[in-house]
Image (cartoon, coloured by chain):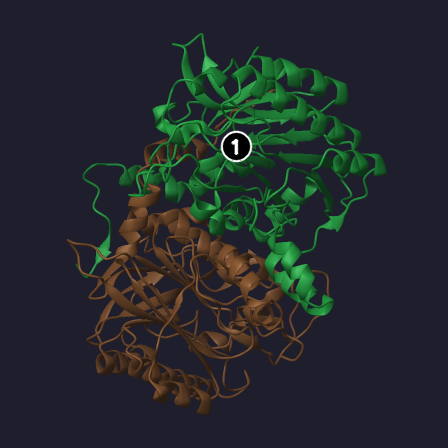
Chain colours: A brown, B green
Amino acid sequence: MSGEVESVESILEKYIPPGELESINKILYGNPALDLEIPAEVLEKAEAENYQVKAFSIPALPEETRRPRLVKIGLIQNKIVLPTDSPIQDQISALHARIGAIIENAGRAGVNIVCLQEAWTMPFAFCTREKHPWTQFAESAIDGHSTLFLAKLAEKYKMVIISPILERDETHGDVLWNTAVVIDQTGKVLGISRKNHIPRVGDFNESSYYYEGNTGHRVFQTIYGKIAINICYGRHHPQNWMMYGVNGAEIVFNPSATVGSLSEPMWRIEARNAAIANSYFTAAINRVGTEHFPREFTSGDGKPAHKEFGHFYGSSYIAAPDGSRTPGLSRVKDGLLITEVDLNLCRQITDKWGLRLTQRLDLYAASFTAAVNLDYKPPVIGK
Amino acid sequence: MSGEVESVESILEKYIPPGELESINKILYGNPALDLEIPAEVLEKAEAENYQVKAFSIPALPEETRRPRLVKIGLIQNKIVLPTDSPIQDQISALHARIGAIIENAGRAGVNIVCLQEAWTMPFAFCTREKHPWTQFAESAIDGHSTLFLAKLAEKYKMVIISPILERDETHGDVLWNTAVVIDQTGKVLGISRKNHIPRVGDFNESSYYYEGNTGHRVFQTIYGKIAINICYGRHHPQNWMMYGVNGAEIVFNPSATVGSLSEPMWRIEARNAAIANSYFTAAINRVGTEHFPREFTSGDGKPAHKEFGHFYGSSYIAAPDGSRTPGLSRVKDGLLITEVDLNLCRQITDKWGLRLTQRLDLYAASFTAAVNLDYKPPVIGK
């Protein structure tokens, strides 16, 4: 999108001299993520296909009783490929082709776990409140075409793939869900995780399409570590992040779709706060670009009807339990962010900071339980 | 401290041209806080007494059924005044004189609520694990000399003052607490709020001195709005912030004492995340400077014994429910941050973002309650 800044990092690097840049980067980003070498072929492919690749590594201390648990995480952010009024099957096929190629490249770079953006098979059409034609993008989590498509890539590269889709649950009333499908490194569907908190903000009341998820805070034990998925708006709810941590997640993915005017100042804060508070890694993924819809809609903000609602600002990043984070991907371009992390860092930081030791979960179990009573009287002094 | 950066903001402003600075400030800081005019006399006093004053305003939309609820918040960050081996009564008197003068200046600027830094009457000596002489800084919350001293200023300026001290609870076993005393605008002690989460990190196992607080998540109804105090390490615990919100707080103060090498990358994240997640204002206050102690101590990090543990980096700031924040005070200098906020913004953002509407407190009451059972089995798929 013209006029959009490429990234915060690109501006800092452009203007600030190295010494002072290092000082404020340490404050803004924490311990610097190290550069990770990836095959030249991967970079060439990406350049030829017009997307960005960035690669980092976040190490941990060596331990005597555990080996390093290195995992290469890949995050993919992208624009839609075809206009939103193209035939739906064409739109899906074009996205399969685009994302398939990026996943192939991630595979070449040795990525172990890939996560795609929220509702990656479609434009983010929920702003329109139109059911037709958009709900035709919905598919089965278990044997829908996107799951079958990704299963082959997962098996080919021994990769775990997290595929956030609009799910049609044909076996339970044909309802829709906002769902992440977890495909393991053999191509098998390990399970699904549904969006726990549904927005009613700005252009979106997504409860027109799907309700709050009913899969709780499950964690997936993969061969690369324990992962969980907190979809989009759930990132605003620290208690949601927390339950994934209580259940043992070491990496929590946050596939999202959110635009600049609404949420950008929050984007750098929330997933990173969750990494700190829960001593785990978080991975924040946002789509890119501006999507134009065929028919106009209003946004509940008193402004005239319109056909697009703003710029998805990308900026996908990884945050580590020690409070550090990688630079972000571009605000305007498709991209693949590769980050090799040592999961041993989770326990090391759990021990160092003691945030689980000191979390007083029993106090909050009692406090929340009291607070949900209709006759709960908050302790207010001086009233 | 020589070699320390003055602030992130000062470096951004020094090097980045105005147009691009505006773009990335919008991402880094959200909607820009407006400059607030304050009397020249206040600035002159501050300059003469060698501390910084910054003043901002964070407005809300006008409403038809409520008047604006403007509150001027003042945050004070400071170095200790005398060396830590000076007579204790002298150290306290010197801090009273220094802070008293800054509060007088805040009063002249029309500040309504002032919050001081954690344990403001003393050096942050808990790293030493020595009981003698430091516990002599402890005093009664109700009629200790610091409360009596501040009560006069509170009454003089019709100001609510939050005074975080090392409390000696003479009437309940003579134990120590880390306590914020809330003094109302008439000079009366409205009540106390104790630190809920006690660190065992880095140089600090403060449970050598005091335990987890027993005052819960109380909120103080003042004439200027509902306030609460989340002391220091409690900022790492989102569920702690959340309960103050559930109980109705509109501003939550976070008086702290924390050093650069330990926590600085987290400082900009946590209080701001809390403001977003709970649709209230947060106020983060950190002390400044490096404190040298008379006897050496170790830090549990394998390094040689030493007499100081690092630089308190100041950087106090206010975060708003819309995800924006003020610039910070200096990393190296005493300071007074004045921010006029319209508390109507809390409800406006509660309505806009719906984060309370969608918080599913009942789900988390049940989840936390289940999780504290010793035989709780986390839902792990694929194990």
Quick one: label 1, few (<14), some, or many (20+) residues within 10 Å?
many
Given residues A201 and A312, the one toward you in this image is: A312
Q: Position of residue A346 (x, y in %)?
A: 30, 53
Given residues A117 and B167, the one toward you in this image is: B167
With A130 as the anchor, is A349 left or right in this view? Answer: left
Relative to A252, say whether B234 is above or below. above
Q: Position of residue B20 (x, y in %)?
A: 68, 69
Chain to which mark 1 belongs: B
Furthest toward the left, the residue is A65
Relative to B370, say whether B179 is above or below. above
Q: Amino acid at mark 1?
A: Asn
With B100 as the anchor, is A49 left or right in this view? Answer: left
Query: In which image quadrant can residue B229 be found?
Result: top right
Q: Position of residue A160 (x, y in %)?
A: 27, 72
Quadrant of the drawing holding the N terminus of chain B:
top right
- Could you tell me if residue B339 is visible in this image? no
With A243 as the anchor, is B144 left or right in this view? Answer: right
Given residues A141 and B21, the one toward you in this image is: B21
Q: Position of residue B292 (x, y in %)?
A: 48, 33
Furthest toward the top, the residue is B171
Query: In which image quadrant can residue A205 be found?
Result: bottom right
Image point (49%, 32%), residue name: B231
Residue under pointer 1 = B247
Given residues B88 and A354, the one toward you in this image is: B88
